[in-house]
Every structure is written in C-alpha cells, then in structure tokens.
Amino acid sequence: MDATALYKFSSGLYVVSAATQDDYGACVINTGLQLTSTPLQVQVVVNKQNHTEGVIERAGHFALTAITEEATMQYIGRFGFRTSTAFAKFEGITCEHTVLGDPYTPECAACVLACKVVQTLDVGTHMIFVGEVEDAQVLSDAAPMTYAYYHSTLKGKTPPKASSYIAS
C-alpha cells in the first residue's frame, strides 16, 4: 500500500485553541472541516498527546482560525512545533478572545470561528471534536493556506503528532 496517496487529499491549515479559567492551549492542525450548515458545525481532529486536546475537553469549546498564505514558517512553528505547556504561544503578538473566551490572533488569519463542543469521538491516537459555531468573523481577504501550499511553497514538514503523518 502507498499511504502517500493520502498526500493528494486537499485540506487547509488552521490554529485550534481553547482556554479554561486557568489554562490554555493552541496548536496547528490540517483537519478543520465544515460538517453541516444547519446547525452550522465544524470538526477538528487533535492528537491526544497535544496539550490543546485536553484543554478543549475541559473547556467544552474552541476557536478555529484559518491560516493565510501570509504566514511564515516562524508563525507556523510558534503554534505547531512547540507545546503550550512550555511556550506562551500568544505572548508578544496580538491576542484577542472569541465570545466563548478562547484566544486567537488575527495575524495571518482569514477567519475565526467560536465553537461549542457538541460531540467527541475517540479515534485512537486522536480525538475528533464536533463544534457548533456560536460566532464567526472574517479577518482577512488573503488566501487561506492549504496543506499543499505549506509543503510545496514553504517546504514545511509533517510532524509525528499530525493526523496526516506517515513514517518514512
């Protein structure tokens, strides 16, 4: 089997973040997807080893921000290659909060969704969170970044915790 065939699937690149009263987490994912329009629901898939996954579970809500092509590898690295337990991901950049209290940055962001978790599904290494969209805002007209753009133009790598990771 050639599992690299899955590299042909099209997806975007997103920052998913969540906050409780005393903790927050944020990470880059390539698994944001609209599920339904009535009610308006999206899903995110987060590795269970990521700190952000536990914060989403405890908070019961999350923010989903679509990354634009303006983002650099430093921006993606800030959210994607460091843990929220050891690095303050929103320190030193513009940080705002959704109506549900989750942090996000409007920098390099096409839009932000504030989502209340309505379902979860454990799929082994990852958790799927279905969120009902409570609020949505367009933040930029810049083109959203696709995972293909991330690989071909930015020459980004797929980290082992990503749902699309395939060991060499």
Image (cartoon, rainbow, N blue to C red):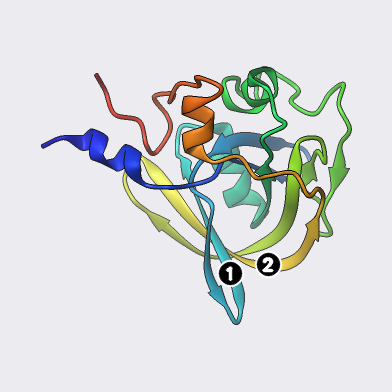
Residue at 58% from the left image edge and 35% from the top image edge:
28
Contact, CB < 8 Å: mark 1 with mark 2? yes
- Tell which of 147 and 98 is nearer to you: 147
Task: Please name the residue shown 78% across and 49% down the image.
Answer: 141
Q: Residues within 10 Å of mark 2 (few under 14, many from 20)?
A: many
Corner quadrant of residue 40: bottom right
* Count of all numbered marks drawn on residues in the image: 2
Numbered mark located on residue 113 in the image? none
Would residue 100 be found to the left or right of residue 46 on screen?
right
Q: Earlier in the sequence, mark 1 or mark 2?
A: 1
Q: Amino acid at mark 2?
A: Val
- Tag 2 residue: 133
Instruction: Judge left or right: residue 124 versus residue 121.
Output: left
At numbered mark 1, what does the secondary structure look like: helix, strand or loop? Answer: strand
**Against 48, is 63 above or below?**
below
Front-lying residue, 165 or 98: 165
In this image, 36 relative to 141: left or right?
Answer: left
From the image, tell me which residue sits under label 1.
41
* Residue type (three-letter) at the residue carrying disc 1: Gln
Residue 77, horizontal then vertical, whole percent:
62, 20
Position in image of residue 114 (x %, y %): 73, 58
Choose between 167 and 20: the one closer to the eye. 167
Location of residue 59 with respect to 77 vertically, above or below: below
